[in-house]
Amino acid sequence: MKFKSIGLGIVLLVLILVGGIFLWHGRQQITPQETLVSYFDFLVIEDYESAVEIFYPLDGNGDYDWSMVTQYRHTKTKSSTKAEELANYCEAVGTCLKVEVLSSEQTGDDLYKFTVQFINSDDSILLYGPFGGMTEEEMQPETKFQYYVKKIDNVYKVITPPLYRP
């Protein structure tokens, strides 16, 4: 009887795990925060195809704008996919890192603002700056950044690009 209950527990655990995988691949995200964290997790593991599916960069006017990503397209490549362009962007800026969400708030209909910290591969917090020969007195390093997630066509998508590092 003991083995039956252990076996049943293992079966239930497997069903829960598999169900979670199918839930994600069906793109039925549960929360905007899960979308944001998943997006950066995809970037960290270099699964750019999955990251592109939940990334919809908007400019200051609220219009779709992929051009900031394409500025890092390899010039010898005649055409490339959005996943390849996002990979080039991440390679160029070096800030496609794991995130830790510090706070969140709903700022409008289907729009959510998150304050995050980036976690380096050595588990330290990313210090952003100073740049261009400036000192810390001239430009204090930043550790907290704002990211936005918006529901677009019934799917939560990250609308803020990965942090640009000059």
Image (cartoon, rainbow, N blue to C red):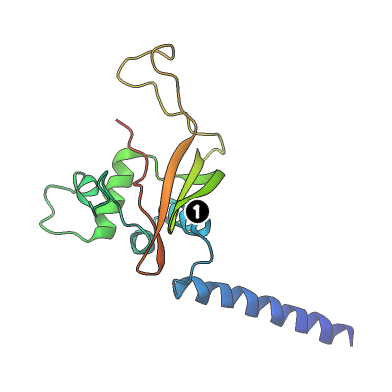
Q: Looking at the image, which residue sits at the far right?
A: 1
Residue beneath disc 1: 37
* Placement of 99 over or under 50, stated as above or below: above
Q: Residues within 10 Å of mark 1 (few under 14, many from 20)?
A: some
* Placement of 4 over or under 77, stated as above or below: below
Left or right: residue 87 versus residue 33 is left
Residue located 35% across and 52% down the image = 159
Q: SS class of the residue under badge 1?
A: helix
* Placement of 127 over or under 60, stated as above or below: above
- For the residue pair 151 and 135, the one nearer the viewer reads as 151
Please identify the quarter of the rendering in which residue 145 is found: top left
Q: Image quadrant for the C terminus?
A: top left
Residue 75 lies, in percent from the top left, at: 12, 47
- For the residue pair 42 and 158, the one nearer the viewer reads as 158
Residue 122 lies, in percent from the top left, at: 54, 38
Left or right: residue 19 versus residue 80 is right
Residue located 18% across and 59% down the image = 80
Q: Image quadrant for the N terminus?
A: bottom right
Residue located 50% across and 41% down the image = 115
Counting the numbered discs, the total is 1
Residue 149 lies, in percent from the top left, at: 42, 54
Residue 62 lies, in percent from the top left, at: 27, 50
* Placement of 5 over or under 100, stated as above or below: below
Left or right: residue 50 versus residue 4 is left
Q: Looking at the image, which residue sits at the far front?
A: 108
Amino acid of disc 1: Val
